[in-house]
């Protein structure tokens, strides 16, 4: 038996325990251990049935994802032999009960389905989340799940990848019983109950599979949904094909097709990108100079200054995590408006089934409106979300310094301003940090956490931990203008406007980037966020612009005409009452006129150039940010772009995408733009070096770690 699997006995019931912390993944050694246990059980006449259970906090969370990278890069790697083990388990003449707690995901659920019975703790979850890694189930999950739960549920779970709670798993036939209390004891007594019953094999069941005619609409709808909701991704469609095969082919042939589709997905760029994202989301939580043991400041109460869109959203986020929050505004009318918005947002969430009315009522009680700083003395954390202007922010922080208790965290939701300058208005800059939420704050997952020069490690560690508690993905960034996300967004948007000025249509620019996979085109995003936001900032910083450098003018000219985007009913597009974008020929005419006046030559622009110009603008700025140390790792930039800017996850983020294309190719294209468009396209020194050395952005992090 391997160290990872133990076999014990409770009289006539054998107990197989998998102990491979932290999540009992099916790493090399686990299948061998289970196989050895099954063989021993077969030989032991005193054993009537067996229970297979996970040690620690969970059943099995799936195949070991780390092994996949080894397999695709040609090194050895294990885990793909799981299907034969599952046949062996299913063929055991002594019934095997799978006892599920925590999560039975991916290969974990596949393992569970090879057992003759499944019992689960009420808090357990089961699922086939492989599509989220750009994969499909590869150990007969697409064949056994529809046999237990029917084709409709099977295809939904395999193609969408969302988990199912234990009670629903019982309802769908995926588990046979819920066990309250001690799971092992309950499973052993269940095993005794069924020990004499015949051991049914899941793969031989056909009662729930349905006829081809019944299933036709199921698969048609699944494909339509996948094309819409998982745009550009290959795995969901492959998963649907595999589940459909379960309804048409014998088990063995279905498994063969599943294996082929699984392998195609495993070696695809999409899967490599999504696996990078999986590990990246966990990597960003690790800050090299802030050890795990850093003390955390308890955050039991909070306060938010400013009840506008951002402040209100932040208050909701805190309340949703169960933290009581004071919400302060300067006058009653603004406070009333802010509260009305919060009520409206919660009502929408109830209508959409995201929250129950009871949950919302409880959250609303946690938000306490106020016009004064009086009660701020109790707050462990204050987040300032007032209008974006340095003078006002400094005034607020000076006031917070006066009223807040010592040790309270003072955070600013600034999206561009210098956090050290804000901190300097207090006598405790070590307690000041940036927490840049993205709009709408209660929906967007990203939280940029901005480290000031003297922000204490405790404050940073607390902010990182809090991000998890409030359901966000916190990424630590340095204090440069626009931080990471907006600093990169600026050249991205700039190029999109240049392209329009050079002759591409507004629609052509947006659709090229939408087809690349962005959630929205950059010009449509501008209309949504308000074109006036950038316009005002550009006016404020005009004195910093270098003379002779090309400046985009079309967006600013639209603002001069009062076309701010959706909020004024017109921007790059026109908008109807339901805020649907409509092409506006007037914009095309105006831009032609302005371009002629500015002497910008007009030409045909291909979708490929649109994508390269905009995406490589992100990459080039990202390379500078990385080299200057404002992002810790290339993957931190990727995670920011996926969660805050709608970059397609299956491309892994801008830096990963550039690594996939090859930095030499990216550099050459940027150099081409440099020759054609001048100084703004000066290649970042890091990109130039890595390209010359045949390296990737990912290698830069290895260099840094090695140097540390
Ligand atoms: C599959 O099964 C394919 C099969 O169909 C076919 C086979 C032929 N492998 O998330 P956490 C690590 S594909 C390796 O922070 P939580 C994770 O990186 C797989 N490592 O904890 C982290 O490491 P570190 C299908 C894994 O409690 C640590 O464990 N399964 C794996 O918030 C803790 O993770 C999935 O896609 C793994 N499978 O959440 C499930 N899983 O501490 C993926 C986790 O060094 N996993 N790690 O940063 C999850 O969804 C969550 O981890 C889970 C726990 C919900 C289980």
Image (cartoon, helix red, strand yellow):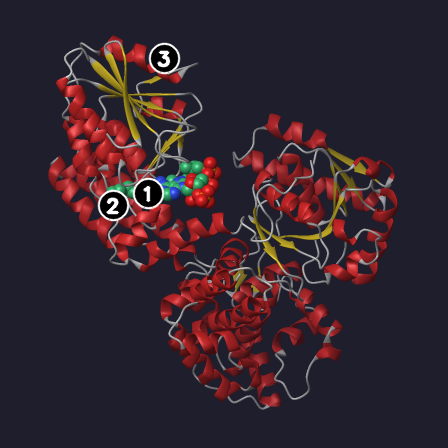
Sooner in the amino-acid sequence: mark 1 or mark 3: 1
Q: Say whether residue 493 is visible.
A: yes
- The residue wearing badge 3 is 185
Provide the secondary structure element on which disc 1 rests: loop
- The residue wearing badge 2 is 78
Q: Measure the C-alpha gap from mark 3 to mark 2.
A: 33 Å
Q: Measure the C-alpha gap from mark 1 to mark 3.
A: 28 Å
The answer to the question of whether label 1 and label 2 lie on touching residues, with beta carbons closer than 8 A, is yes
User: Looking at the picture, does residue 168 appear above or below residue 612?
Assistant: above
Task: Give the class, few, some or many, for how many residues have Cα within 10 Å of label 3's Cα (few <14, many ≥20).
Answer: few
Q: Say whether residue 438 is visible.
A: no
The quarter of the image that holds ligand 1 is top left
Sooner in the amino-acid sequence: mark 3 or mark 2: 2
User: Looking at the picture, does residue 632 appear above or below residue 401?
Assistant: below
- The residue wearing badge 1 is 64
Label 3 within 8 A of ligand 1 by Cβ: no
Q: Residue sitting at 16 percent across and 36 percent down?
A: 84
**With 137 as the anchor, is 566 left or right in this view?**
right
Task: Give the class, few, some or many, for how many residues have Cα within 10 Å of label 1's Cα (few <14, many ≥20).
Answer: some
User: Looking at the picture, does residue 111 appear above or below residue 409?
Assistant: above
């Amino acid at each position: 038996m391997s160290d990872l699997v133990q076999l014990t006995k409770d009289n006539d019931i054998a107990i197989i325990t998998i102990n491979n912390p932290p999540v009992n993944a099916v790493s090399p050694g686990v299948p061998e251990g289970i196989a050895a246990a099954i063989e021993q059980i077969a030989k032991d006449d005193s054993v009537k049935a067996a229970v297979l259970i996970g040690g620690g906090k969970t059943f099995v969370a799936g195949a070991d994802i780390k092994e996949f990278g080894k397999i695709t890069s040609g090194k050895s790697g294990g885990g793909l032999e799981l299907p034969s083990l599952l046949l062996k388990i299913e063929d055991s003449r002594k019934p095997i009960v799978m006892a599920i707690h925590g999560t039975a995901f991916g290969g974990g659920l596949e393992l569970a389905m090879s057992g003759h019975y499944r019992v689960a703790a009420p808090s357990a979850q089961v699922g086939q989340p492989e599509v989220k890694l750009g994969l499909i189930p590869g150990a007969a999950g697409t064949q056994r799940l529809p046999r237990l739960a029917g084709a409709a549920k099977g295809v939904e779970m395999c193609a969408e990848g969302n988990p199912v709670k234990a009670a629903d798993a019982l309802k769908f036939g995926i588990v046979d019983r819920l066990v309250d209390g001690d799971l092992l004891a309950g499973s052993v007594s269940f095993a005794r109950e069924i020990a004499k019953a015949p051991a049914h094999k899941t793969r031989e069941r056909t009662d729930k599979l349905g006829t081809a005619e019944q299933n036709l609409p199921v698969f048609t709808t699944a494909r339509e949904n996948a094309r819409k909701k998982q745009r550009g991704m290959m795995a969901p469609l492959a998963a649907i094909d595999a589940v459909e095969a379960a309804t048409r082919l014998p088990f063995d042939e279905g498994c063969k097709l599943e294996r082929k589709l699984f392998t195609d997905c495993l070696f695809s760029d999409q899967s490599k990108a999504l696996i990078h994202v999986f590990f990246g989301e966990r990597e960003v939580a690790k800050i090299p100079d802030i050890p795990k043991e850093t003390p955390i400041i308890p955050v039991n109460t909070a306060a938010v200054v400013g009840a506008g869109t951002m402040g209100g959203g932040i208050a909701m986020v805190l309340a949703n995590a169960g933290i009581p929050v004071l919400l302060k505004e300067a006058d009653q009318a603004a406070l009333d408006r802010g509260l009305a918005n919060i009520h409206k947002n919660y009502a929408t969430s109830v209508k959409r089934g995201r929250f129950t009315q009871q949950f919302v009522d409880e959250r609303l009680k946690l938000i306490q409106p106020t016009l004064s700083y009086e009660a701020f003395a109790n707050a462990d954390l204050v987040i300032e979300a007032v209008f974006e202007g340095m003078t006002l922010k400094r005034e607020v922080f000076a006031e917070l310094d006066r009223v807040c208790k010592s040790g309270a965290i003072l955070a600013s939701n600034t999206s561009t301003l210098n956090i050290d300058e804000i901190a300097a208005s207090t006598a405790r800059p070590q307690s000041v940090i940036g927490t840049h939420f993205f709009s709408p704050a209660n929906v967007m997952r990203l939280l940029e956490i901005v480290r000031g020069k003297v922000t204490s490690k405790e404050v940073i560690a607390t902010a990182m931990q809090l991000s998890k508690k409030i359901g966000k993905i916190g990424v630590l960034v340095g204090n440069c203008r626009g931080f990471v996300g907006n600093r990169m967004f600026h050249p991205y948007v700039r190029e999109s406007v240049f392209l329009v000025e050079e002759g591409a249509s507004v629609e052509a620019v947006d659709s090229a980037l939408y087809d690349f996979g962005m959630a929205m085109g950059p010009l449509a995003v501008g209309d949504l966020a308000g074109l006036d936001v950038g316009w005002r900032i550009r006016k404020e910083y005009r004195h910093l612009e270098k003379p002779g450098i090309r400046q985009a003018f079309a967006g600013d000219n639209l603002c001069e005409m009062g076309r701010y985007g959706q909020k004024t009913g017109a921007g790059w597009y026109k908008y109807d009452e339901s805020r649907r974008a409509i092409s506006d020929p007037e914009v095309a005419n105006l831009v032609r006129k302005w371009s002629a006046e500015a002497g910008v030559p007009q030409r045909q622009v291909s979708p490929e150039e649109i994508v390269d110009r905009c995406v490589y603008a992100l990459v080039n700025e990202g390379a500078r940010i990385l080299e200057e140390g404002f992002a810790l790792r290339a993957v931190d930039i990727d995670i920011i772009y996926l969660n805050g800017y709608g970059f397609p996850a299956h491309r892994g983020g801008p830096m990963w995408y550039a690594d996939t294309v090859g930095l030499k190719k990216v550099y050459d294209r940027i150099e081409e733009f440099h020759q054609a468009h001048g100084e703004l396209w000066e290649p970042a020194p890091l990109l130039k070096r890595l390209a010359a050395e045949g390296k990737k952005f990912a290698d830069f992090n290895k260099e840094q770690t090695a140097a540390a």
